[in-house]
């Protein structure tokens, strides 16, 4: 589980980093941490913004089963190692999955994104996710999902081994079936504040591909 940080100071055997670690490393459970230098890819994007526009997919993929390869694209993806970037004031229509912050994307803001589902769900296995967080220090604020009354989907999910801190603030979901849910294998450091979507911080056990405990240090 990689937690990219900048070392601010070293005093003896105490290392202080710029952002607190979101997961515990407890020797009582035979856990062992390592400090390893790394260099982000030279082609990594930084300070990239997308604002004030609408994105529409026609024909719609809304409600299509997840393993349909023709409907697997996200409207907006922050690729791995993207830093200090944002999307703001965007309307998205017709996608099955709307926004992804990929693993190792850091310091990302997703603000006032309105996502519209135009078809009921087809009832296939695996509900799509509106916003998927797999990076670190991701803030989603003022976002919302609208549309078809039987458009079952997750409002916000985290993926496997997602190291926060990450936060969802002021989130609105029109459909009562929607949830905000850490979804796979031990995400940590996840804050949800002011949302009408139900929260589901659970052990998914053997569900999915064996998702187990989905969250540590969630609130």
Image (cartoon, rainbow, N blue to C red):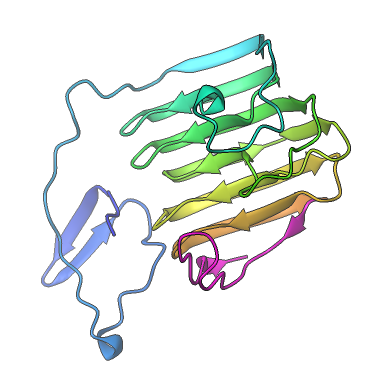
Determine the residue positioned at 49% across, 17% down: 49
- Residue 75 sits inside the magenta stretch: no
The image quadrant where one finds the N terminus is: bottom left
Q: Position of residue 136 (x, y in %)?
A: 42, 46
Q: Nearer the viewer, residue 206 or 14?
A: 206
Of 99 and 27, which appears nearest the observer? 99
Q: From the viewer's perspective, tell me whether residue 148 is left or right of residue 87.
A: right
Task: Work out which quarter of the rendered image holds the C terminus and state it.
Answer: bottom right
Pick the front one: 109 or 61: 61
Q: Is residue 106 above or below residue 84?
A: below
Look at the image and give the residue range highlighted in magenta.
197-219
Residue 43 left/right relative to 69: left
- Quarter-wise, where is residue 129 in the image? top right
Residue 109: x %, y % from top left: 54, 32
Image x and y of residue 87, in percent? 56, 22
Point 73% across, 45% down: residue: 123
Q: Residue at 27% x, 55% y: name it.
A: 2
Viewed as shown, does residue 217 lie left or right of 119? left
> Which residue is farthest bottom?
28
Residue occupying the point 10% across, 71% down = 12
- Determine whether 143 is above or below 33 in the image: above
Is residue 210 located in the magenta-colored stretch of the structure? Answer: yes
Residue 91 position, x and y percent, is 71, 18
The secondary structure that dominates the magenta segment is loop
């Amino acid at each position: 589980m990689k937690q990219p940080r900048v070392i601010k100071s070293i005093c003896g055997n105490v290392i202080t980093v710029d952002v607190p670690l979101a997961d515990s490393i407890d020797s009582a459970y035979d856990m062992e941490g390592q400090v390893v230098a790394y260099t982000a890819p030279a082609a990594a994007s930084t300070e990239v913004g997308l604002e004030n526009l609408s994105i529409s997919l026609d024909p719609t993929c809304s409600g299509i089963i997840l393993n349909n390869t023709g409907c697997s694209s996200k409207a907006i993806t922050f690729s791995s190692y993207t830093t200090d970037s944002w999307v703001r004031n965007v309307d998205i229509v017709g996608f099955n999955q709307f926004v992804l912050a990929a693993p190792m994307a850091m310091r990302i803001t997703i603000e006032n994104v309105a996502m519209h589902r135009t078809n009921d769900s087809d009832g296939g296995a695996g509900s799509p996710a509106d916003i998927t967080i797999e990076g670190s220090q991701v803030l989603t604020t003022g976002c919302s999902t609208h549309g078809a009354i039987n458009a079952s989907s997750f409002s916000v999910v985290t993926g496997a081994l997602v190291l926060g801190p990450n936060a969802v603030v002021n989130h609105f979901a029109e459909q009562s079936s929607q949830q905000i849910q850490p979804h796979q294998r031990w995400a940590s450091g996840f804050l949800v504040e002011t949302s009408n979507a139900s929260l589901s911080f659970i052990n998914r056990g053997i569900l999915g591909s064996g998702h187990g405990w989905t969250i540590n240090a969630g609130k």
